[in-house]
Amino acid sequence: MLELFHYVHCPYCVRVRMALGFLHIPYKSTVLRYDDEATPIKLTGKKMLPAMTFPDGTINESLDIIKRLDIKQQLGFDFLDNVGLPNVDEWLTKLGSPVHNLCMPYWVWSPEFDEQSRQYFEKKKSAKRGPFWQLAQQRTKFESELAPVLKELEGNLKPFFQNKNMTIVDLMLAAHVWGLYILPEFRFSEKMHNYLQSVKKNCQFDYHADFWRQKDAV
Ligand SMILES: N[C@@H](CCC(=O)N[C@@H](CS)C(=O)NCC(=O)O)C(=O)O
């Protein structure tokens, strides 16, 4: 069976989980500790997830994993070709910065982390962003940075991103935005919430399922 090594909060891992769900591909889900450097390095040579073990070896890079899974091209890979490609990376940068600043202080308090991995994560991430308590204090600022980006994104939903059908772009965008569900009292607009819920339904996605599944279940 295929095995996915991932972090529950990680948007790149989430997009792979969404793709697996959409394509109805069964897999073994293995959540690694964030401070476990040895396992990912042993798997692919890099301390980076997601990583997926196929019968002939383990690869990383979420889009490479998804391309390899999507043998029937159900996810619409024409969107990743040069012609007509909406500038996904630009969108992800615009979204990623405020989303990560808002979510990181809360992600570390989810059951994915214990004291040791929490300290590892915070030390690593705050080198770039500043201490988490300061990020949490600047919530209003990050929310005002995010609001126009979400609004613009909403304007592109037809009901999926510039498309009437769901494509890989929706998985990439939704996986980035998804983290906000962890932010206390955050409210999506109705349109954005409905969009995320459609992606969830199409992908049978359950963000935190790994925290609560029985230890012996796959
Ligand atoms: N380009 C990679 C990005 C993956 C990535 O950035 N993963 C982060 C987690 S969100 C990671 O593994 N970070 C390890 C670390 O910072 O220790 C992909 O698409 O898979």
Image: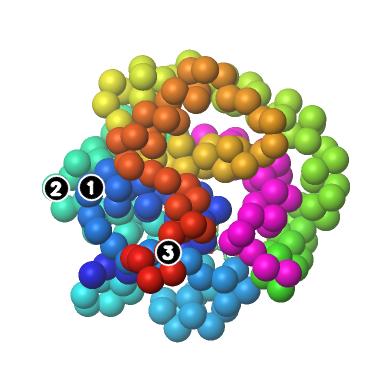
Q: Residue at x 44, y 31 (%)?
A: 196
Which quadrant would the C terminus be assigned to in this image?
bottom left
Q: Residue at x 50, y 51 (%)?
A: 208
Dot 2 falls on a residue whose secondary structure is loop
Nearer-N-terminus badge (2/3): 2
**Residue under numbered circle 1:** 23
**Residue under numbered circle 3:** 214
Q: Position of residue 100 (x, y in %)?
A: 65, 45
Dot 1 falls on a residue whose secondary structure is loop
Is 123 drawn above or below residue 10 in the view shown? below
- C-alpha span from label 2 to label 3: 32 Å
Quadrant hosting residue 113? bottom right
User: Label 2 near label 1: C-beta < 8 Å?
Assistant: yes
Is 120 drawn above or below residue 145 in the view shown? below
Q: Position of residue 93 (x, y in %)?
A: 57, 41
Q: Which residues are magenta?
A: 90-115
